[in-house]
Image (tube, grey):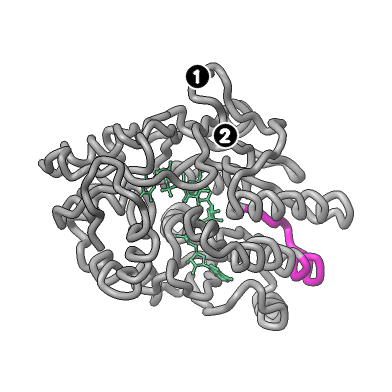
Amino acid sequence: MKIIVTGGAGFIGSNFVFYERKRHPEDRIICVDSLTYAGNLETLKSVLDDPGFRFVKLDIRDREGVYKLFEEEKPDIVVNFAAESHVDRSIENPTIFLETNIIGTSVLMDACRKYGIGRYHQVSTDEVYGDLPLDRPDLFFHEDTPIHTSSPYSTSKASADLLVGAYHRTYGLPTTISRCSNNYGPYQFPEKLIPLMIANALADKPLPVYGEGLNVRDWLYVEDHCKAIDLIIRKGTVGEIYNIGGHNEMRNIDIVKLICDYLGKPYSLIEHVTDRKGHDQRYAIDPTKIHKELGWLPETKFADGIRKTIQWYLDNKEWWENIVSGEYQNYYKKMYGNREVLDGKEPEA
Ligand code: NAD
Ligand code: DAU
């Protein structure tokens, strides 16, 4: 079977490529990625010479390029990870989010219609459901929870989901959608909470916690997400949406303290800074459907996953130090330089 994996040079996409090559070595993976700031060919170095793998530098908005690739490869399945994925960046500049996440998705699905595929899978997010209040721990996101987005990022992802539904209903495109909670693990770009806090703590830099740090996320080890997608594309029902989550809710402040504990760093590094605009309070997924229909359950406990993740960042300093030494410095200044420090200390670049 031939599978096109878009966004495979990013965090979850690369982990999915590794998972598929190991789990289904008989399949061929064609990785499409335009290598934005978040895509890194270095991440894929272990598979670049693998005969069952091909890397193609291509933007999913490039209709001609995408059609040419489909014509050449005639894929059976397309799994779309390619996206602008960082909420804070979407607040700064929504346009590229609309272009990649919505237009890019439509170009891929048009190619699927034109050349015929067995399955188009859209990798979506729990953020399309908006947020839940902190004082209602009994509430969870179900697949039929109404879409109610907060940020330009989540709105672009929700728009793409609606388009996927439309292509299924209108054109009969064989689609599936998965909506997953927050992932953590190897190769996550250090702009996201966990790797950012690890990198800053190791450099004894301030740990910028938005507001009081009481917002709750439902953390899932990236390999468990990859396993879920693998099951959906092979055994899931066409036209369906599957929620993926680990029932592992944690407050941001507790995650940051845990990282300090693991690295032997003092909590005095923690700085409470101006909150994210429109900051979602709590995400919590009900994964009953994927468990009942496909037998999926998360396998990595948070205590093991976070230990493995921190160890990975310790063992692979070169990978992330290359990232944080370049353009990232400007990004960091721009995103964090203007945040007021709520406890009297100045944030460092
Ligand atoms: P990421 O930012 O690490 O990677 C995105 C990848 O897409 C990068 O390699 C980038 O170069 C590529 N890309 C961006 N624009 C492109 C374009 N126009 N054409 C081709 N490639 C392009 O993101 P991630 O965290 O790995 O997320 C992957 C997917 O999973 C996204 O669709 C995201 O919405 C979704 N998701 C992420 C999480 C999470 O916790 N990270 C949770 C649920 C869902
Ligand atoms: O829920 C799935 C989503 O999870 C994905 O769709 C997104 O692509 C992914 O980026 C992630 O979004 P979040 O906004 O939840 O992740 P982020 O790592 O940016 O932030 C996690 C929490 O930590 C959030 O409440 C904001 C807070 N935070 C984040 C950063 C970067 C801080 O307090 N300080 C920070 O410096």
Report the number of numbered marks.
Answer: 2
Q: In which quadrant of the rendered image does the C terminus lie?
A: bottom left
Q: Give the quadrant of residue 214.
A: top left
Residue 94 locus on image (x, y percent): 60, 62
Residue at point 33%, 63% (across, down): 332
Magenta span contains residue 118: yes
| Residue designated by label 1 | 135
The numbered mark at residue 131 is 2
Front one among 124 and 267: 267
Question: Real-space Cα distance between discs 1 and 2?
Answer: 12 Å
Residue 333, compared with residue 157, is above or below; it is: below
Front one among 88 and 20: 88
Residue at point 54%, 43% (across, down): 278
175 sits left or right of 7 in the view: right
Residue 100 locus on image (x, y percent): 62, 67
Residue 334, compared with residue 217, is above or below; it is: below
Segment tinted magenta in the rendering: 110-122
Q: Is residue 211 visible?
A: yes
Residue 342 locus on image (x, y percent): 30, 42
Magenta span contains residue 198: no
Does mark 2's beta carbon lie closer than 8 Å to ligand 2?
no
Residue at point 78%, 49% (across, down): 165
| Element assignment for label 1 | loop
Residue 112, compared with residue 127, is above or below; it is: below
Residue at point 70%, 39% (across, down): 147
Give the amino acid type for the residue marked by disc 2 in the picture. Asp
Task: Please tell me how crowded label 2 is: few (under 14), some (14-19), or many (20+) other residues with Cα within 10 Å.
Answer: many
Front one among 224 and 63: 63
Give the amino acid type for the residue marked by disc 1 in the picture. Asp
Residue 233, compared with residue 139, is above or below; it is: below
